[in-house]
Image: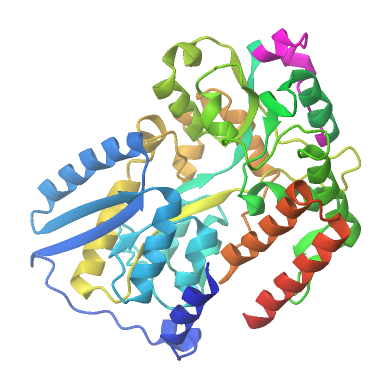
Amino acid sequence: MKRSIALVLMATLLIPFSLFAQGRKEAVVDENAPVTVQYWTHEDPARTDLENELIATFMAQNPNITVVRTTQSSAKQIELVQTAFAANQGPDMFNLPIENQYAYITNYRVAPVDYQAAGYANKQDLLDNYVEGVLDTVTVDGEVYGLPLELTNWAIYVNKKIFRDAGLNPETDYPKTWEEMADVSEKLVIRDGDILIRRGFDFRYPYYLTFFVPMVEQLGGELISSDGKQAIVNDDAWIKALTYMQEWGPSGRNLGSPTYKNARKLFNLDNNDIAMAHSGLYQEGRIEADNPEFFESGEWMVIPYPVFEDAVRDVASCYYGHFFMVNIDSDPAVQKAAWKLAGFLLSHGEDYLTRGGNIIQPTKALFASDTLKNMPYSDVFINDMGRAHMIYYGANSAEIQTQIRYAVESVMLSGVSPQKALATLRSAVQEIIDEQ
């Protein structure tokens, strides 16, 4: 989050959060009065088709409720929601990645879940329906402030044809460690001078909280100490991870760079320009939509997130959530209608998995379903989720991610030493957490 917007949000409220939560009173509303719910979400063609269908059904069942669904690109959505809330004109219902959304809880801009409107008898009924611990992320002072549209983690997609073209067996020669990832990528790359025509693998820049922090954690480092007071724990782990990125980049082994097109967006096309890409289960639906022949070919597979050879922890890529949240400044009748809409949408978890972009809603029912178990390589994602944890989230998590980006990209692109980049990063992140 940009610091200016964070400060604007902080400045709008003065009361302690515990008093805010405990002082909440249930408003009496006329549930038959006409209301309009402004729902903002990020673009996803498959999910758009499904949600438009579900919303039409919802409005037919609730003729007094009109839903206006507005979409933007993921990055643009984050910016627009921030700007709208800063001007006290936020949407009635919205979702963002939790690392960008958590500040709306801590800055008192969203309402606690209306359990009955969302279709639950009470809070315990809600908790009983979800995988244990998932709602801890959006629970503060005993109140739950969001319902998960999706829980996402990333593994590694592999193009088998490119492996064979380089003389490798994809079933046995795929990388299990980061050291192997670099060595295998060296065998897969095709260069025209210093220009990479074909990459073996490349990272999901700039989502460093998702993929880079776990690499540091594998080596024994931490972003923030357990007591929340110290930024950047275990210098050796951070320096090794930053050195790895430096050697990966154009001034090192020249295996990839933030300046190239996102590897995930190229993978589906099967154009011999990327062998491996980091993405979620949702990528399967996008492969099928973009390139049905490749999807049906059996020429792709998914492998687990690698670890360093001398890792002291087995940590996979972080998972992250998008949560439906409701604007606390919306009219009480609109809030109730919004929670009713959220609950209705989330009662169609298998539809979201099969027709809505292959996204996972972390309910116990879905995790136990044959629908999820029978999806290609779902076991890889589920097993990696068991090795992972929720992405770092906090009032300024997005700003912290920006500082990690500066550090990683400075060693990759500007020749800054890992030691100097680390010192700058520590200073910046310490200042951020000291201000929280």
Q: Quadrant of the C terminus?
A: bottom right
**Which residue is outermost to the bottom?**
14
**Nearest to the observer: residue 379 or residue 248:** 248
Q: Tell me residue 74's x, y (percent).
A: 43, 49
Residue at the image point whose x is 32% and y is 74% from the top? 328
Rendered position, 243 above or below 355: below
In depth, the one of 401 and 63 nearer the eye is: 401
**Residue drawn 55% across the image and 17% down it:** 271
The quarter of the displayed image where residue 153 is located: top right
Q: Which residues are magenta?
A: 162-178
Q: Is residue 109 left or right of residue 62?
A: right
Residue 249: x, y in percent? 76, 40
Is the residue 128 above or below the residue 365 in the image? below
**In the rendered image of this protein, does residue 361 appear above or below residue 125?**
above
Q: Position of residue 311 (x, y in %)?
A: 87, 44
- Asked whether 164 falls inside the magenta stretch, the response is yes
Position of residue 33 measured from the top left corner of the image (x, y, whole percent)? 8, 67
Q: Quadrant of residue 235?
A: bottom right
Q: Is residue 167 magenta?
A: yes
Left or right: 270, with 330 as reference point:
right
Q: Residue at position x 38%, y 87% from top?
A: 23
Camera sees residue 276: yes
**Please, is residue 32 above or below residue 391 in the view?**
below
Is residue 176 in view from this perspective? Answer: no
Outermost front residue: 193
